[in-house]
Image (cartoon, rainbow, N blue to C red):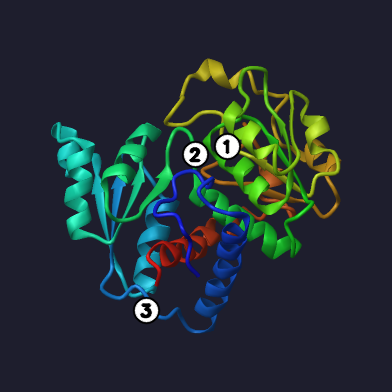
Amino acid sequence: MKIKTKDLLTLSELTPKEFLGLIDHSIKLKKELKKGGNKPFLKNKTLTMIFQKPSTRTRVSFETGMYQLGGHAINLSSNDTQLSRGESVEDTAKTLSAYTDCIMARVYDHSLLDKLSKHASVPVINGLSDSFHPCQILADFMTIKEKKKTLKGLKIAWIGDGNNVCNSMIFGAALSGAKMSIATPKGFGPDKSTVKVSQNLTDIELTTDPVKAAKNADVVVTDTYSSIHNNDPKRIKKFLPKYQVNDKIMNLAKKNAIFLHCLPAKREQEVTSSVIDGPQSVVWDEAENRLHSQKALLLALLHA
């Protein structure tokens, strides 16, 4: 399938039809791989990956995905580029566009991605920024679709920090017709503009009560309270124990509810081991689906 946008930085660039099409194509690619492999639609194509911060799932899934589609991926850490020595983002974007077919960047500041996309002539993918994580949400909604067979009308409970992943999940809910109930401590809610835009398309509820959010949920989601973006130990105290996803919280959701976490998880903080290792957890399918959903995205952006 093809999508109109040149870049994917937030998910807001997609139409509902495009978003759902990517989810369905991801599932198709996964089935094809299990049956013997994907066709080399990206033969002779190169993806440049820029990592300002460490990565496990993002790097391995993109690199493996390019390989499985017949292409090649180049990994660049901050120290591998002239960005660390003062070269402008604009000049870097133009240079990489001459060598490569697509750029994926995992950055601290989202504004760097905006500059990259503005000055690059090739597609730019947000592999995670301080504001959004669209690739994770493609995998999340692929996983939900696999397990629930539908997306529209489902209740997704987000419990914890209204962070970059939460922001992108709000866009995912709006594009799919799912509803969200987001429980965060006061002052830790998601991006207000993201919520406002998305509320025009679906129900997005903001609360400080995790019990209210989890009640009758089809999907329960959380993420770490501390990250590379914010690692203040005092911050964690504002979330615990109230915003921990544990057996009590999961028992408030529907009996067939599933649990998602983008990983890495800090066990016994935002989630207990009994939940993440329990029968309702689908986090390992979710992690695997980064591979398949990003292949669908690469094919769509490169019109392959």
The earlier-in-sequence mark between 3 and 1 is 3
Disc 3 is placed on an element classified as loop
Is 149 rendered above or below residue 12?
below
Frontmost residue, 92 versus 292:
92
Q: Are marks 1 and 2 in contact (CB under 8 Å)?
A: yes
Q: Within 10 Å of the Cα at label 1, are there few (<14), some (14-19), or many (20+) other Cα atoms?
A: many
Query: Is residue 290 in sight in this rendering?
Result: yes
**Image height of 93 relative to 109, above or below:** below
Note whether 55 is above or below 192 in the view shown.
below
Q: Secondary structure at mark 1?
A: helix
Quickly name the residue at label 1: 167
Q: Residue at x 19, y 48 (%)?
A: 94
Q: Is residue 61 left or right of residue 81?
A: right
Q: Is residue 228 left or right of residue 75?
A: right
Q: Residue 40 shows which numbered tag?
A: 3
Label 3 neighbour load within 10 Å: few <14, some 14-19, many 20+: some
Q: Secondary structure at mark 2?
A: loop
Q: How many marks?
A: 3
* Residue beneath the point at 46% across and 80% down: 37
Residue kind at label 1, given as amino acid type = Asn
User: Residue 188: x percent and y percent?
Assistant: 61, 22
**Label whose residue precedes the other's in the sequence (2 or 3):** 3
Residue type indicated by callout 3 = Pro
Q: Residue at x 48, y 61 (%)?
A: 3
Left or right: 162 as drawn, with respect to 41? right
Q: Give x and y (percent) for residue 241.
A: 70, 24
Q: Residue at x 63, y 25 (%)?
A: 189
Residue linked to disc 2: 132
